[in-house]
């Protein structure tokens, strides 16, 4: 069995999308027709989401249509209806609805004084009619689309419309006209250097040569389109190449490429084409019982959609399959339905195939007159579709192409030779210039040698003075750093905190909570031991800092009877043993969040500490759901305020000294958190610590 055109509808769809990617989108031109009002802005948003987000595109399009209709805005209605027609085609494949919307768009364009983008409606209507096999009407509107595009100076969009006209002629059965248009489009694509359009037209020529059963030529054009046959980028191209393999009776290759089609992500439109190709593969194998289920499932999709071209192809496949299975009733039923559709639309390609099928069926039934009648019609249609003149024209075009490629190859070789000569001359000149500059450089060096000796002696003296001054400054900075470290440790773990810890232990003992007192005392002793150990080191690992925080928070939770909960989140994959920071850098901020944010909160509080790395920077976030700084300021005593400010100030000075920044207090940011009613919901502190500084020290900077 010879199958019909190779999923031409999907090829045409991809041609439209490919031209859009290359700047040939009619809706891209349509944006320039719109103004800057609210309705026009909604339409522009819908166009932006046209092929990326179905729900957003429909939402903005419907909003624009509703407002345009209520304000009787003719241009907005016209563009909106054309866009809705395109959305209907892309997401539901309902070509009858697309036709209805496109005609309504044309009616609104008739009411609008601005018809600069009426080609949007022409394009949608032409495509919808093509899918319904109403080729004469389709070509008429696509021609209007082409004429308007050329008149407006948008050449790429015009070429896209011309390419669609070529598809319509081919499906109609006018191969010669389709071939002429393909050649014309190719010339335009070469001039514009549009690789996407060139690729699609090579596929178009491959389709044409498949239809006239010149499979070697078809294979060549597949190669030109893909660079290497079989390396297709999308599923429909893989299906086309699989069909070519089946026609050449390379069934193993056909099966291989069919298996590469990703059916799990196919939409209904592409799936019906895949089922057809799969069924036709089994027909070429002679396994008709295996082919029948694929055709039957494809027919279910065909009847849901309104693509008559593919529906007629499927009906013809079913008729021939039922005939091979010895079920003439089913064969006649599908053959008559296919022939009736072809007559309605004057689809000569499918008329020819339908007549051939009916002739074979009547011949098997012994109705020689009817068989002869349909066979004569088949011969007449075949001669009109494919005559010697068209074949000769295809062959001559192939010869012209070969000559052109040879000439281009010769020209390319000549250009390469000229470029090689130019590069050689440039290299020779460069060597001469380099030698001249080298001579001048040596001469200048000798002249400056004596002066440099004196300058070097003077520079060495100045460097010695600077070195002595730098050592004194460095010693002073180191001494200041040690002093600040000691002050920070004392301010962070101050006598007030120790007194509170001992007081809490005493309270546990008096309350006969011996286990709690023992647990608290154990954690307190571990914390003090770690603080004393770490006080001797300028840097500790992030893991050790987290361990200190865990001990401190455990004590505070125990002291306040579980009045709050906490969570420490460390980015997955973060190596805390490989990152080093100054000791007890985070504890003052955590303590501040507990005592001034969570301690005064009536309900249960929550504290979050998050750590992650961004490049060479460690980001620490400390967030509580306490009463906020505004209310805490009213409750705090002067001594508490002084303790808080001193702790944060000393911590900032530590980091400024380590980095050499010269200014303190600029490596963290404190934000107040509010809800929608401007009620305080807590406080958030963000610390930024660079962990890969040139000096090897962690660097704090303003968040």
Image (cartoon, rainbow, N blue to C red):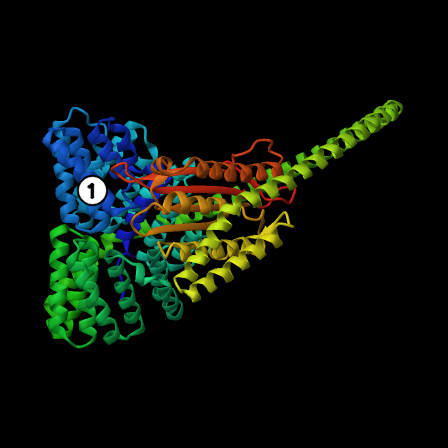
| Location of residue 82 in the rendering, given as x and y in whole percent from the top left corner | 19, 38
Q: Position of residue 205 (x, y in %)?
A: 35, 50
Image position of 231 (left or right of 258): right
Residue shown at the point (23%, 46%) measured from the top left? 55
Q: Secondary structure at mark 1?
A: helix
Residue at 28% x, 56% y is 7
Looking at the picture, does residue 482 appear above or below residue 556? above
Question: In the image, is residue 314 above or below residue 152?
Answer: below
Residue at the spot of label 1: 59
Quarter of the figure with the N terminus: bottom left
Residue depicted at x 61% and y 39%? 484
**Farthest residue in the right direction?**
450
Q: Nearer the viewer, residue 192 or 509?
A: 509
Query: Dot 1, how many residues are within 10 Å of its Cα: few (below 14), some (14-19), or many (20+)?
Result: some
Quarter-wise, where is residue 476 in the image?
top right
The x and y percentages for residue 8 are 28, 53
Counting from the top left corner in percent of width and height, residue 637 is at: 41, 37
Whether residue 392 is visible: no
């Amino acid at each position: 069995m010879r199958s019909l055109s190779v999923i031409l509808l999907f090829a045409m769809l991809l041609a439209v999308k490919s031209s859009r990617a290359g700047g040939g989108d009619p809706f891209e031109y349509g944006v320039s027709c719109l103004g800057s009002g609210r309705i026009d802005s909604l339409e522009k948003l819908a166009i932006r989401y046209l092929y990326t987000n179905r729900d957003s595109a429909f939402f903005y399009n419907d909003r624009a249509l509703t407002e345009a209709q209520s304000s009787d805005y003719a241009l907005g209605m016209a563009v909106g209806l054309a866009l809705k027609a395109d959305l209907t085609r892309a997401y539901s494949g309902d070509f009858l609805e697309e036709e209805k919307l496109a005609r309504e768009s044309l009616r609104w364009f008739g009411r609008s004084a601005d018809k600069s983008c009426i080609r949007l409606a022409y394009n949608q209507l032409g495509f919808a009619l093509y899918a319904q096999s109403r080729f004469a009407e389709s070509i008429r509107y696509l021609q209007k689309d082409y004429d308007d595009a050329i008149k407006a100076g948008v050449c790429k969009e015009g070429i896209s419309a011309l390419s669609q006209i070529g598809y319509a002629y081919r499906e109609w059965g006018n191969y010669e006209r389709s071939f002429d248009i393909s050649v014309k489009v190719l010339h335009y694509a070469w001039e514009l250097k549009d690789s996407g359009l060139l690729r699609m037209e090579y596929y178009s020529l491959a389709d044409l040569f498949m239809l006239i059963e010149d499979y070697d030529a078809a294979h060549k054009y597949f190669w030109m389109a893909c660079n290497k046959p079989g390396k297709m980028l999308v599923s429909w191209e893989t299906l086309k190449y699989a069909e070519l393999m089946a026609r050449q009776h390379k069934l193993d290759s056909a099966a291989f490429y069919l298996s590469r089609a990703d059916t799990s992500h196919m939409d209904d439109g592409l799936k019906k084409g895949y089922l057809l190709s799969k069924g036709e593969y089994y027909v070429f194998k002679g396994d008709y019982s295996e082919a029948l289920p694929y055709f039957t499932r494809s027919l279910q999709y065909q009847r849901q959609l309104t693509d008559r071209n593919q529906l007629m192809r499927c009906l013809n496949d079913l008729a021939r399959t039922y005939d091979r299975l010895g079920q003439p009733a089913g064969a006649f039923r599908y053959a008559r339905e296919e022939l009736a559709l072809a007559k309605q639309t004057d689809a000569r390609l499918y008329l020819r195939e339908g007549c051939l099928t009916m002739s074979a069926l009547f011949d098997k039934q012994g109705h020689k007159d009817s068989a002869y009648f349909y066979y004569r019609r088949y011969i007449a249609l075949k001669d009109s579709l494919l005559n010697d003149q068209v074949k000769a024209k295809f062959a001559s075009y192939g010869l012209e192409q070969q000559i052109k490629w040879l000439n281009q190859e010769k020209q390319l070789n000549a250009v390469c030779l000229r470029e090689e000569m130019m590069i050689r001359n440039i290299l020779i000149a460069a060597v001469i210039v380099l030698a001249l500059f080298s001579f001048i450089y040596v001469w200048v060096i000798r002249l400056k040698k004596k002066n440099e000796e004196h300058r070097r002696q003077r520079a060495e003296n100045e460097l010695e003075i600077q070195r002595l001054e730098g050592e004194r400054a460095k010693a002073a900075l180191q001494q200041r750093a040690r002093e600040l470290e000691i002050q920070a440790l004392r301010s962070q773990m101050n006598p007030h905190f120790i007194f509170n810890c001992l007081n809490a232990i005493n309270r546990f003992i008096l309350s006969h909570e011996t286990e709690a007192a023992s647990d608290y005392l154990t954690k307190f002793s571990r914390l003090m031991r770690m603080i004393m150990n770490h006080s001797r080191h300028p840097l500790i690992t992030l893991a050790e800092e987290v361990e200190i925080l865990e001990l401190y928070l455990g004590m505070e939770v125990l002291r306040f009877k579980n009045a709050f909960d906490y969570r420490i989140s460390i980015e997955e994959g973060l190596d805390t043993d490989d990152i080093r920071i100054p000791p007890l850098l985070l504890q003052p901020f955590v303590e501040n969040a507990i005592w001034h944010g969570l301690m005064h909160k009536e309900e249960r509080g929550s504290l979050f500490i998050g750590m992650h790395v961004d490049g060479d920077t460690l980001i620490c976030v400390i967030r509580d759901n306490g009463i906020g700084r505004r209310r805490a300021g009213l409750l705090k005593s002067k001594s508490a305020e002084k303790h808080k400010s001193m702790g944060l100030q000393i911590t900032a000075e530590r980091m400024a000294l380590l980095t050499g920044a010269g200014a303190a207090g600029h490596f963290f940011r404190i934000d107040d958190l509010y809800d929608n009613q401007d009620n305080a919901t807590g406080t958030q502190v963000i610390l930024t610590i660079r962990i890969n500084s040139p000096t090897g020290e962690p660097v704090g900077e303003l968040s």
